[in-house]
Image (tube, rainbow, N blue to C red):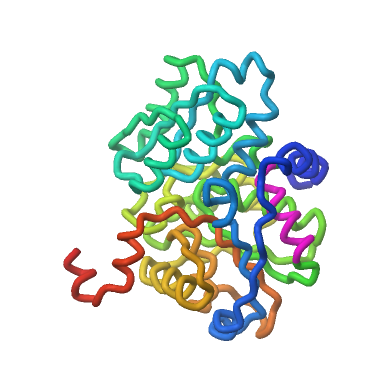
Amino acid sequence: MLPIPIEAIRDAAARTTPYLHRTPMLSSRTLGERSGTSLLLKCESFQKTGSFKPRGALNIVLSLPEARRARGLVTVSAGNHAQAVAWAARVVNVPCTVVMPEDAPHSKMDAVRGYGATIVAHADRATLFDRLHEEEARTGATFVHPFDDPIGLAGAGTLGAEIVEQAADVECVVVPIGGGGLMTGVVCGVKALRPKVRVVGVELAAGPGMTPALAAGKPVTVSRPATLADGLTPPFVGAIPYAVAKEALDDLVLVTEEEIEEAMRALLTRAKLYVEGSGAVATAALLAGKVRVAPGTRVVSIVSGGNVDPERVLALFAPSATRAGA
C-alpha cells in the first residue's frame, strides 16, 4: 500500500486545477536517439512559478482552515518551493516568510520577493530547518513543508497521474530526488494507475540524500555540494519519501555535475528548453546511459524546473578554460 492514495491525488487535482497549468509533454527524437529510448519530456518548467512545486504547496494552502491560513505561511527552500509558497500566499492573500540559503540563485530570490514574501537569508544549509522553526515560533505562521507533508505529496502526485493520462504507453518515468517529495508523488500517482511502470530516481553523485538514507535505514543529515542543481540540496530526505523509495522505487542512480551541464546544454539546444540544473538531472541520467531500460523503451523524463540565473546558463557555453577559471 502506497502512503498517498489515488483518491487523495484526485482530490488534490480537483482543488488545484483551476489555478495551475496542465504542462506539455514534448518529444525529442535527437535526445531519444542519444539515450536509446523513445523519449518524452514532461515540462514542469512551464508550470506556474517555473517548477512542479505549486502542485503541492497550493494543495496544502487551500486545504488549511481559513483562520489558520490567515495567520500566514512560513517555509524553507533553496528556491522553487519558496516561490511556490510565496505565489500560493498571494493567491489566498496572506503573508509569507521564507527561509532561504543566502547563496540561493538571485533569480529565485527575486521571484520570491516579487510574489510579496519576506526572505530570511541563512548562511548554513545544514541548519536551515532550525532557522525555519525559529521563524515559525516567532510569526505563528503555518509551516508549509517542502517534501514531507502528505497533503503536499498528494499535490505532487497529480504530476504522476497527469503523466499517465498524457502518455498511456509509458514504460518508465525518470524523476529527480532532492528531499524526495516529487519522487513520492510521481511513484504514488503512476503506480496507482500503471503498477508495472518503472520509476527511476536520480540524485547528485557528489551529495546524495536518499542513497545514504537507504543505507542507514532512515533519513540522515547529509552535506550537500555546491551545484547547478541547487534544488536537490535539502539537508535530509523526508520520512515519507524514504519509505516510498524503500518499498516502491525501482532504481536509484547518480549523476555528476558534468553530466548535468551536458544535459542542460542538450535540452536548450536540441529541445529548446531553458532548464535549471535540478530540472536537467533526469535527462542527464538518460543521456549518460545510467537508466537501465531496453532499447526503444517509452520513457518520460521529468523536467522539473526552469528557474536558473541567465549567467549560469551562458557559462555552460563558455570555453572550458573560461569555465574553469570562473
Rendered location of residue 118, percent (x, y): 40, 28
- The residue at the point 29 percent across, 67 percent down is 315
Is 158 displayed left or right of 69 in the figure? right
User: What segment is highlighted magenta in the picture?
Assistant: 155-166
Closer to the camera in the image, 217 or 49: 49
Quadrant, the C terminus: bottom left
| Image vertical order of residue 122 relative to residue 210, above or below | above
For residue 325, say whether it is visible: yes
| Image vertical order of residue 158 relative to residue 61, above or below | below
Rendered location of residue 30, percent (x, y): 56, 83
| Image vertical order of residue 281 relative to residue 156, above or below | below
| Image vertical order of residue 214 relative to residue 113, above or below | below
Q: Main secondary structure of the magenta part?
A: helix
- The residue at the point 59 percent across, 42 percent down is 54
Is 241 displayed left or right of 74 in the figure? right
- The residue at the point 56 percent across, 48 percent down is 180
Q: Is 160 contained in the magenta span? A: yes
Is 162 displayed left or right of 174 in the figure? right
